[in-house]
Amino acid sequence: MKNFLLSGLIAFWATGAIAHSPLDETTPANEAIVSEMPTEVLMEFKGDIRLVRVAITHASSGSMDMDLGGQTAFTKAFRLPMHDMGAGVYVIKWRGLGADGHALNGTFSFTVE
C-alpha cells in the first residue's frame, strides 16, 4: 500500500512539473550587466504560455506595465518593447497562464551601466 501511494505521489508531482511552462531564457539574461539599453526584451518559455501582465520596475521611474501589444495567444516566445529609463537595475515581473490552465509568474532582472 505504501508503494502504491508513493508511486501515485511521484506521478502526480511529475505531471505537475511537466505541465507548467517556466521561463527558460531571457534576453538580456537574468542578472546580466549590459552597456546599452536594449530596445526589447525577449522572454522564452519551456512550453506555451499566455502572458497577462508584465511590469517593469526601475529606481528612477517606479513600476509600469509593459505593452504586450497583440501578443495574446499561447506561445513560447515574447518580444516586448523597452523604454530607456536610464542606467540602473531593471526588474521585470510577469504573470501568465499556462496551456494547462495553471497561473504562472516570475521575475528576472538586468542592469544597464
Image: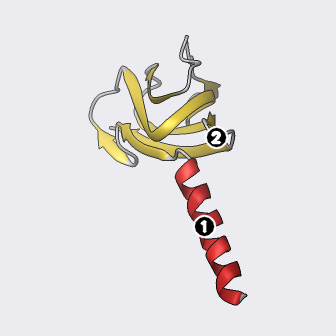
Which SS class for mark 2? loop
Residue 49, image x and y in percent?
Answer: 55, 33
Query: Toward the viewer: 77 or 67?
Result: 77
* Residue 35 in view here: yes
**Could you tell whether 65 is left or right of 82 in the image?**
right
Residue at 41%, 36% in the rendered image: 44
Q: Residue furthest left?
A: 35
Residue 105's label in the rendered image is none
Residue at 36%, 20% in the rendered image: 39
Residue 2, image x and y in percent?
Answer: 70, 88
Query: Toward the viewer: 10 or 74?
Result: 10
Instruction: Between label 1 and label 2, give the one nearer the viewer.
Output: 1
Q: Where the N terminus falls, by quadrant?
A: bottom right
Q: Is residue 31 above or below residue 11?
A: above
Residue 11's label in the rendered image is 1
Q: CA distance from mark 1 to mark 2?
A: 17 Å
Count of marks placed on residues:
2
* Residue 62 in view here: no
Q: Which residue is mark 2?
A: 100
Mark 1 crowdedness (10 Å alpha carbons): few <14, some 14-19, many ≥20:
few
Which SS class for mark 1? helix
Q: Which amino acid, mark 2? A: Asp
Q: Is residue 103 above or below residue 50?
A: below
Query: Toward the viewer: 46 or 70?
Result: 46
Q: Which amino acid, mark 1? A: Ala
Residue at 42%, 27% in the rendered image: 86
**Could you tell whether 64 is left or right of 107 in the image?**
right
Q: Is residue 109 above or below residue 5?
A: above
Which quadrant holds residue 62?
top right
Mark 1 / mark 2, whichever is N-terminal: 1
- CB atoms at circles 1 and 2 under 8 Å apart? no
